[in-house]
Every structure is written in C-alpha cells, then in structure tokens.
Image: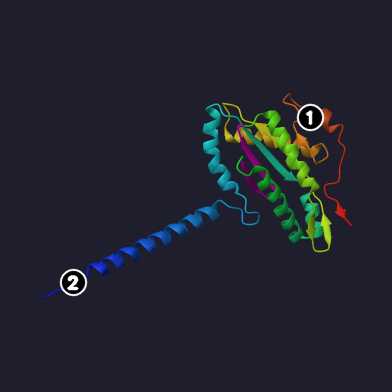
C-alpha cells in the first residue's frame, strides 16, 4: 500500500495555523483575566484585583516600604440616586473614578471597592503625604461639575487614611482606614480623617458635627 505524503509547505501551513489558534486562545484568556479584574462601570480595578494585589503590597511593607491606603466614599449617594435617578448616579461614579485615575496615574492604584466606595493604594507614601493626596483628591472631586441632561451637579466624598506598619495585615490596614472614613462621614462629609497621626477623640468630634451639603445643583 502507498500512503499520501504531505509536502513541507503543507506542514508549515499547519504549524502556522496552530500558532495562530494558540495566540487567539491566549488573547481570549488575557481578556478574560483583565475583565475579571476590572469594574465594568468605571473601568477601574475591582475588589478582586485589589485583594490579589494586596498580597504583594503586604510583602513590600513588611520589608520596610510604606504604603498608604485611602478609602473614599461618596457622600449621601442614596439621596443623590433617589433625587436624580440611577443613570445620574452611574455618571457621577464614572466622574469620581476619572478623578481617581488622573490622580494615581503611574504612582498608585485606584479601584472601585464596591457600590459608592473606592480605594487608593499609594506606595512609598508617609502619613503627611497621604493626607495631602487625600485632600487633593477630595477637593478636585468637589470642584468637578457633572453634566447630566439639563443639570449641572456637584458631589463630595469622605476619605479615611491609614498608613501601613511593618507588622500589618491587609485586613488590619483596611480596618484602620475604614474607621477613619467613619469619622470623616460623622464630621459632616467632605472631610479627610485623620488630620493628625495622634489618636482622635471620637466623642469630642461627634459633639462638634457641622453637617454640610453633599451635593449642589447649579443653575
């Protein structure tokens, strides 16, 4: 019996086709992994991406590098949604995310933590630098006008700041930032907490609350 033989050009063609298929599969996998780490609404990283990256960051700060974590929460988001609708709420979240992206480009990581809450992780950042970052972010969000249909809207955020310690876990760092965010919200919104590294007298702070509008409609 005689068997058909393949020309070398046929074998080359089959090899190229296989390589093309492998590349396509790799691209699909890469896109899938990217989507799994990305918040669809804002384009920022999501909580899964943040939790995965925290493992590397935790190793870094245990080696002596200092990281600052900023937890950012939109003030009175439910009221905003109820008044202007969920589409306006989505536009507002995208606008906040844009500011965070601009402020952290090439120097840190911005993610949507969940709902109306965001987080920034800043490497090689001490307490004074972290508070300065937080105030800049907060002020730029407050100064931003969000155009939605016939309305021009403004929104504010509260920010809690915590700086890593060599013996920290990611959970401990997050808890401290969350505690400071609570104080920022309790202090009347549009605030950064803490203002100093020394412990805050929570009772004294709550006794001097000065509520501020969370958003203002212009014109």
x, y percent for residue 2: 12, 75
Front tag of 1 and 2:
2
Regarding mark 2 in the picture, which secondary structure is present there?
A: loop
Residue tagged by mark 1?
202
Residue 45 falls left or right of residue 193: left
Residue 50 horizontal/vertical position (percent): 58, 44
Q: Quadrant of residue 186?
A: top right
Q: Which residue occupies the extreme right position in the image?
A: 219
Q: Identify residue for label 2.
A: 5
Q: How is the image coloured?
A: rainbow
User: Is there any visible trace of residue 116 in the rendered image?
Assistant: no
Residue 119 magenta-drawn?
yes
Residue placed most toward the observer, 185 or 197: 197
To which quarter of the image does residue 178 belong? top right
N-terminal of the two: label 1 or label 2?
2
- Closer to the camera in the image, 102 or 197: 102
**Residue 35 in view here:** yes
Q: Residue at the spot x=67%, y=47% of the render? A: 102
Range of magenta residues: 108-124
Report the predominant secondary structure element of the magenta stretch: strand
């Amino acid at each position: 019996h005689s068997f058909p033989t393949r020309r070398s050009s046929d074998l080359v063609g089959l090899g190229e086709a296989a390589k093309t298929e492998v590349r396509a599969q790799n691209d699909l996998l890469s896109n899938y992994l990217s989507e799994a780490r990305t918040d669809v609404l804002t384009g920022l990283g999501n909580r899964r991406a943040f939790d995965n990256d925290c493992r590397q960051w935790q190793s870094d700060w245990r080696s002596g590098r200092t990281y600052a974590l900023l937890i950012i929460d939109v003030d009175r988001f439910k009221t905003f949604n109820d008044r202007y609708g969920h589409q306006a709420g989505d536009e507002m979240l995208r606008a906040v995310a844009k500011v965070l992206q601009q402020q952290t480009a090439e120097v840190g990581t911005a993610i949507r933590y969940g709902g109306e809450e965001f987080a920034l992780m800043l490497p090689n950042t001490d307490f004074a630098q972290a508070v300065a970052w937080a105030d800049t972010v907060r002020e730029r969000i407050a100064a931003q006008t969000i155009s939605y249909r016939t309305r021009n809207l403004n929104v504010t955020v509260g920010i809690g700041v915590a700086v890593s310690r060599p013996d920290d876990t990611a959970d401990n760092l997050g808890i401290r930032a969350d505690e400071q965010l609570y104080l920022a919200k309790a202090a009347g919104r549009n605030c950064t907490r803490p203002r100093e590294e020394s412990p805050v007298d929570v009772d004294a702070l709550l006794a001097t609350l000065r509520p501020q509008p969370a958003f203002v409609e212009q014109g």
